[in-house]
Amino acid sequence: MVDLINLVQTLTTPHPLDRYLELVRPTLTARELRAEIVHVDRAVPGSVTLTLRPTRQWKGHAAGQYVQIGVVINGVRHARCYSPIDPAGTRDRHIRLTVKAHPEGLVSQYLHRNARPGMVVDLAPAAGVFRLPDLRPDRVLLISGGSGITPVLSMLRTLAAEGYPGEVVFLHYAKSPEVVPHRAELDAIAERHKNFRIELRHPWRPDTANADHGAPWIDVAPAKTSGYFDYDELERVAPWFADAETFVCGPQSLMDAVRKIYEAEQLGARLHTEEFTVSLTPVDADEAHGTVSFSASGRSAANTGAPLLEQAEAAGLSPAYGCRMGICFSCTAVRRTGCTRNLRTGETDSEQDQPIQLCINAPVGDVDIDI
């Protein structure tokens, strides 16, 4: 079958076979993975949940991994990474993505406004190392904030589907109970699995003082907690945290607070994190000089010190990218010559003809990038 596809691919040059097949039906593909949106749910304010039916190339995902989806907006294809909320290993070949419409999010805003059943999107195979280990630990602590709920929700649902016998605590931070997606599912999990404890935290407000704490969720108790993460909160919800594997995804402030405690307790090996915002080291003004050359396109511009992805876009180029935070590697390009600084680690590298990630690397002086 592969040899036949290769033969047809040769005959259809210069365009790939899938360019012709998509004229018949967008989801009819020989090699490229795509998905059709079959259901759209906008019940939670500011978010949209998409149910996708992938093409036959879909191989499934591990709990906590992400996928990259692509859409065309105003004639330009854009890709972003989102985490399925489904349990791993399900025979249902559908996946669900909950997308929060961020104020500056081009793709998230587009999907929130325009996603509809029948729309076809590009889809990449599941990827990422933020995942449950194959050998399940005896205790699991899941912590999330805001839209970081999606990968840990997949972990929680996977453990529930497996009938996991160990102890689980899921601690989620939100601006208000109303913006927590999939609340009914979480309530049902808490009802069915007595070894799972699910807790919601949100900043205390006067109108929450009389909240109903009899529900399966243990909502914030104003007399005991401020709704923010600290060591006392960790001890309160999971006094056994030192013996557990902990998985965290959320805003940078939450990630930093958890990481600080685990480093102080020398538990870094038990902490697993997924970041959907990138924390970059400041650019040294002395490094913002020279010229950035994009040799494959024949363009160049004065080095501003910004990440190479931003400088390429400012020069009128449209390099591929997915997450803009160094996770998906979609924006990788070859640095032909020059020196760049990794803005996450602060390290510099000047070895020639090396692939680098444009979104998290900035030029140090003259640089030639092959795009």
Image (cartoon, grey):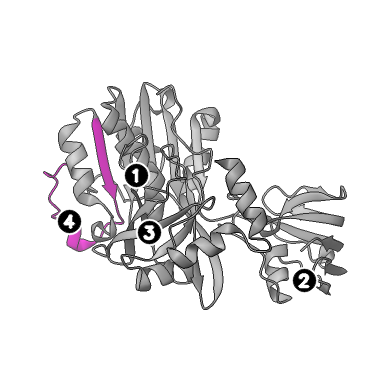
Q: CA distance from mark 4 to mark 1?
A: 43 Å
Q: CA distance from mark 4 to mark 3?
A: 44 Å
Q: Does label 3 or label 1 sit earlier along the sequence?
A: 3
Magenta residue check for 169: no
Q: Please tell me whether mark 2 sits on a helix, a strand or a loop.
A: loop
Instruction: Name the kind of residue labelled 1 in the image.
Output: Arg
265 to 25, vertically: above or below? above
Q: Position of residue 126 (x, y in %)?
A: 49, 44
Q: Does label 4 or label 1 sit earlier along the sequence?
A: 1
Q: Position of residue 297 (x, y in %)?
A: 79, 70
272 to 297, vertically: above or below? above
Instruction: Name the kind of residue labelled 2 in the image.
Output: Thr
Q: Does label 2 or label 3 sit earlier along the sequence?
A: 3
How many circles with numbers are drawn on the protein? 4
The stretch in magenta equals: 196-216
Q: Check disc 2 and report the residue beneath it.
A: 304
Q: Residue 36, labelled with which disc?
A: 3
Q: Nearer the viewer, mark 2 or mark 3?
A: 3
Q: Position of residue 11 (x, y in %)?
A: 65, 57
Q: Quadrant of residue 97?
A: bottom left
Q: Nearer the viewer, mark 4 or mark 1?
A: 1
Q: Check disc 1 and report the residue beneath it.
A: 93
Instruction: Name the kind of residue labelled 4 in the image.
Output: Ala
In the visual, does 138 lie left or right of 123? left
